[in-house]
Amino acid sequence: MKRPIATAIAIAIGLIVLLGYFIPLPILTSVRIELVQWAIILSGVAVLVGVINLFSVHLKKIREKEKGAVYSLFLIAALLLTFILGIILGPDHSTMQLMFESVVIPVEASLMAMLAMTLIYASIRLLRRRSDLMTVVFLITVLLVLLGTAPLPFGPLPIVGDLIRPFIAQVLAAAGARGILLGVALGTLTTGLRIVFGADRPYGGR
Amino acid sequence: MNLTAIAGIVLVVLAAALMLVFSLVKRKVPPVFRDIPAFSRLRRAIGLAVEDGTRLHFSFGHSSLIVPRSASAFAALGMLRKVAEQTSVSDRPPVVTAGDAALTILAQDTLHSAYRSAAAEGLYDPNAARLTGLTPFSYAAGAIPIMRDEDVSANILMGNFGVEVAFLTDTSERETSFTMAATDSLPAQAIIYATAQEPLIGEELYAAGAYVDAGPSHTASLQVQDILRWLIVAAVLSGVMLKLLGF
């Protein structure tokens, strides 16, 4: 009995929000905004549930002495410390800001730097893994755009910098990107409709 | 109501009507889709994982459910449901990682209903779907140890990713695991094209359900996408012709 009710509520809310986007009736718009705000509040609650999930997964790793359990220990210690300090001091406190700026930002920045190396390495391996015409076209395009964009010591390369790179970026890439985005938009539309009409029920249904 | 809203509602109603028709009408001959090698290789990888007793890893990216980009995650959930049913005979159930808490809860629910419908509810472990981080890089950093240490033989990366997807595809390659990757983000598509073993481009992500036989609604939605694509092609070409004729 629980599942058909959940499905009916989900379908009704989906339809109201969808209609609220298109039909400018004040009552429909205000109901839509209210429902979206509820969704935002529920997302906040879901974060708490997600953090409990993260906690329990890593606690299990420590208890069962799995590989990398020491990292799980660090994670749990950092999570608890941040959580307790966040509750006591509040998220805007200077200590919380300092923790964020001296831990999270540098770690993410170093991962970004590692990403550049990972991508260079992946490009080198690409020809070995998939040596077809499209791969060659892909790599030549990457090279031309890099040569046309990079700040070279002797200034921008003639033709490549002022002709080829803009043509690739503004004509070929823009046309391709629009084509891909149209396909993505159609996929998004049909996936959304499947959810709204209850054909796909990722919320405990079919 | 402005012209954009009218066009939008017409498109939605047309798509809904076509989906309803294609879902309900029984075809004598099943629809034939173009061959996408990634899906046949995925089927093989699933079979091998079940035989070897290794795990499949689903990575759903970090899209929030309250933004339009969540559709890619919903498409991935449809695929997870089907694959979880198919692998319910295995000793090692799939593991799911997500960078959004609500998406993690939906993944847990999807796994639970898949095992329930396969009469294997005992296999369900709430910790099989995990939140690994709330920012793109922390999500990737949390998913990498799972790909490396939990006996994963195939990685299915589907959802909204950013450039951090390169870390996931790179780890998969280092572990010599099968990787199928699909995303709705353009920069990430360029990266998966260069780094993933089996990249899916553009709308192929949304075709996944139809290719793994997730149900008539998935097949119908693929047919509707094809019809709407032709309508858009006709509209673009008509616009070009009218422009050339000076209108």
Image (cartoon, coloured by chain):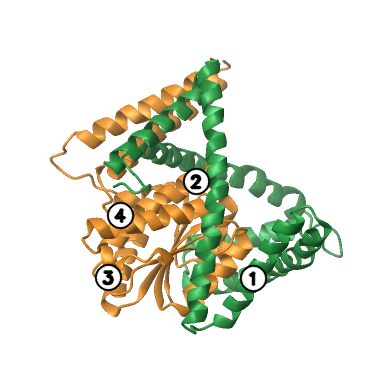
Chain colours: A green, B orange
Local crowd size for mark 2, using a 10 Å CA cut-off: few (<14), some (14–19), many (≥20): many
Where is residue A54? Give x, y as percent.
53, 65
Report in which chain the residue with disc 4 lies. B
Where is residue B99? Give x, y as percent.
54, 58
Horizontal relation, residue A95 to residue B184: left or right: right
Mark earlier in primary sequence (2, 3) = 3
**Three-letter amino acid code of the residue under disc 2:** Ser
- Residue at 50%, 19% in the rendered image: A23
Q: Nearer the viewer, mark 3 or mark 4?
A: 4
Same-chain status of marks 1 and 4: no
- Nearer the observer, B194 or B59: B59
Which mark, by number, is residue B70? Answer: 2
- Residue at 26%, 47% in the rendered image: B215
Q: CA distance from mark 3 to mark 1?
A: 33 Å
Q: Is residue B63 above or below residue A133?
A: above
Secondary structure state at the residue bearing disc 1: helix
| Residue at image mark 3 | B47
Mark earlier in primary sequence (3, 4) = 3
Horizontal relation, residue A108 to residue B30: left or right: right
| Residue at image mark 1 | A120
